[in-house]
Amino acid sequence: MKYRVHRLDVDKDTMQDKLEQFLNKLNGEVISVFPNVKPSFQFMGATAKVDYLLVVEKTR
C-alpha cells in the first residue's frame, strides 16, 4: 500500500467548495482529512482559524 498526503490551502468562505472539488478529482481512497487549526486573537477574544487541510489518500 502506498499513501499520498496532499495539502489544500483553504479559507472559511471557500473551504467546502475547494474540498469537494479536490476530493472528486482523486483517484485513490480517502483515508483521512486533517485541518491545521491555529489560534487567532481578535479584539473580542481568542478564536481559531483553519489555514489548510491535509488529505491522506491511499493509492493503488
Image (cartoon, rainbow, N blue to C red):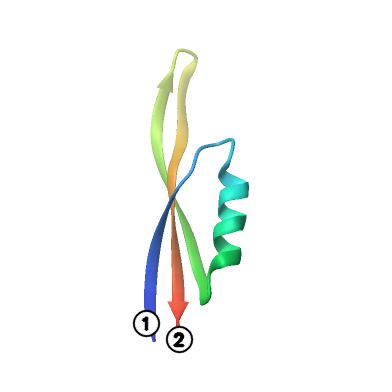
| Quarter holding residue 19 | bottom right
Is the Cβ of the residue at disc 1 closer than 8 Å to that at disc 2?
yes
Q: What amino acid is labelled 2 in the image?
A: Arg
Q: Quick one: label 1 or label 2, which is nearer the N terminus?
A: 1
Left or right? Give the position of 17 relative to 34: right
x, y percent for residue 15: 56, 44
x, y percent for residue 34: 45, 56
* Residue at mark 2: 60
Front residue of 27/44: it is 27
Residue drawn at point x = 53 percent, y = 75 percent = 27
Left or right? Give the position of 54 relative to 16: left
Point out the residue furthest to the top here.
Answer: 43
Residue drawn at point x = 62 percent, y = 48 percent = 17
Left or right? Give the position of 10 relative to 24: left
| Quarter holding residue 51 | top left
Point out the residue furthest to the front here.
Answer: 25
x, y percent for residue 44: 50, 14
The crowd level at tag 1 (other Cα within 10 Å; few <14, some 14-19, many 20+) is: few
Q: What amino acid is labelled 1 in the image?
A: Lys
* Residue at mark 1: 2
- Cα distance between the residues tagged 1 and 2: 7 Å
- Image quadrant where one finds the C terminus: bottom left
Front residue of 34/29: it is 29
Eyeballing the image, is 60 above or below 37?
below
The crowd level at tag 2 (other Cα within 10 Å; few <14, some 14-19, many 20+) is: few
> Dot 2 lies on which element?
loop
